[in-house]
Amino acid sequence: MKVLVNGVGNIGTTLLQVLSTHRDLLGIDEVLAHKSTVRPWDVPQLERLKDSGVVLVGDAYTAQATLDQVAHDIDYVFDAGRNGFGIERRSLYETFPRLLGASAQGTETTFGTPYVLGLGMDASAQRWTHIPSCNTHSALAVLRTLTDGDLDDVAFGDFVVARRSEDVGNHERLVAGNVVARHLDPVLGTHHAIDADKVLAVLGRRLPIQSSDITTPSQFLHSTRFSLRLRSAPSASEVRDRIARSSYVTSTQVFDTNKVFEIGRRFGLGGRLFNQAIFVADNLLVNDDLVSGWAMVPQEGNTILSTCAAFLQRSCGVTEAEVRTAALAEKLLIGPL
Ligand SMILES: NC(=O)c1ccc[n+]([C@@H]2O[C@H](COP(=O)([O-])OP(=O)(O)OC[C@H]3O[C@@H](n4cnc5c(N)ncnc54)[C@H](OP(=O)(O)O)[C@@H]3O)[C@@H](O)[C@H]2O)c1
């Protein structure tokens, strides 16, 4: 199985590190990476990826082959571009003769059918898969965790996403103050609930949810303030138990996102945290049917397990994918933090 990561930025680099480190577990023979724009300061990082066994393709001088030379051999594409690049490149991937499937991330919402790990979704028949954004992942993780997997329990869910302005390694979109995002839908609000609604639609469900978003002058993790009305009206201890037994999430007693980010930098593969949501423990408000609190969102890593699970479902079927995803989660997830 030969896989290509197209786009070597934040998500692309994290994905490359996971795919190359765990290639046997993922059933991958060769990992290729394509970078469209190679600037002189990108070269040492690309060389480092090459040293870890990644084959670089493209027109730049670091490349070992052109994309044209390897296209006939590629089985799966992980597109990691942004702002329409992934969607635009889908027609190119359609020409790859061996292509089993492809996925694209966050912004590329029309690339394919959405897939999020943990909701019992089946991407095995999907050639084109969309992996929704980090904050969509966290909202859905909060919903499935606090309902103990029974989404019918949700009477209403409200999410306020406090976004870090941009990744710590970028310098394009820093903000000076708090910037409120426009509500794009009169019922759902910002794209987070809109995208979560699209994921739930694949499962044949609708939930009464809405989201708002404020971008803050921070570069360390997003945070989400959630407020859920639950028909089961769980006790505070039951809510804590639901968080403890939920997959792909964890909790922390730390209240500062920079300190949680630092734990990822110290202990996570590539300095990343891969949990879908990190609940702030000992800070929940549980009053009858209303459960509120905060979850931190490790944006650079929390969509990676979904990305790998969708690939595994497509390449080896749902049953085998479940075993391999569990093994990968065991290697990547750390917690409590
Ligand atoms: N960053 C996160 O924490 C995060 C979390 C969840 C989902 N996502 C999603 O993942 C996708 C990639 O995000 P990212 O943060 O990894 O993005 P990024 O590092 O800023 O950019 C990704 C790639 O897009 C290409 N690109 C970016 N700006 C470009 C420009 N002006 N002109 C030409 N190419 C450009 C580059 O491709 P080349 O390398 O080929 O030159 C770059 O490596 C997005 O859809 C995003 O929504 C990101």
Image: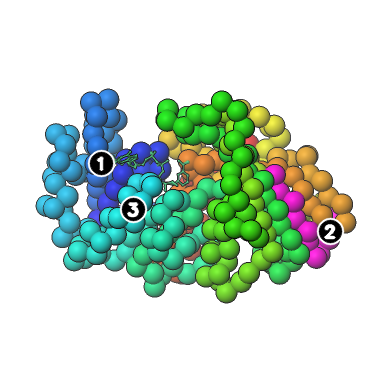
Task: Find disc 3 in the rendering and name its residue.
Answer: 86
Q: Which residue is mark 1?
A: 35
Q: Is ligand 1 less than 8 Å from the beta carbon at label 1?
A: yes
The x, y position of residue 321, in whole percent, is: 44, 63
Between 178 and 239, which is closer to the camera in this rendering?
178
Residue in view at x 26 percent, y 45 percent: 33
- Considering depth in this image, is 37 or 150 the residue closer to the camera? 37
Q: Is residue 312 above or below residue 13?
A: below
- Which quadrant of the figure contains the C terminus? top right
Q: Which mark is residue 25?
A: none
Q: Residue furthest right?
A: 288
Q: CA distance from mark 3 to mark 1?
A: 13 Å
Instruction: Residue 71 in the image: state x and y as whole percent.
Output: 17, 56
Graded by Cα atoms within 10 Å as few (under 14), some (14 to 19) or many (20 or more), the crowding at tag 3 reads many
User: Which residue type carries mark 3?
Assistant: Gly
Residue 274 left/right relative to 307: right
Who comes first in sequence, dot 3 or dot 1? 1
How many numbered tags mark residues here?
Answer: 3
Q: Secondary structure at mark 3?
A: helix
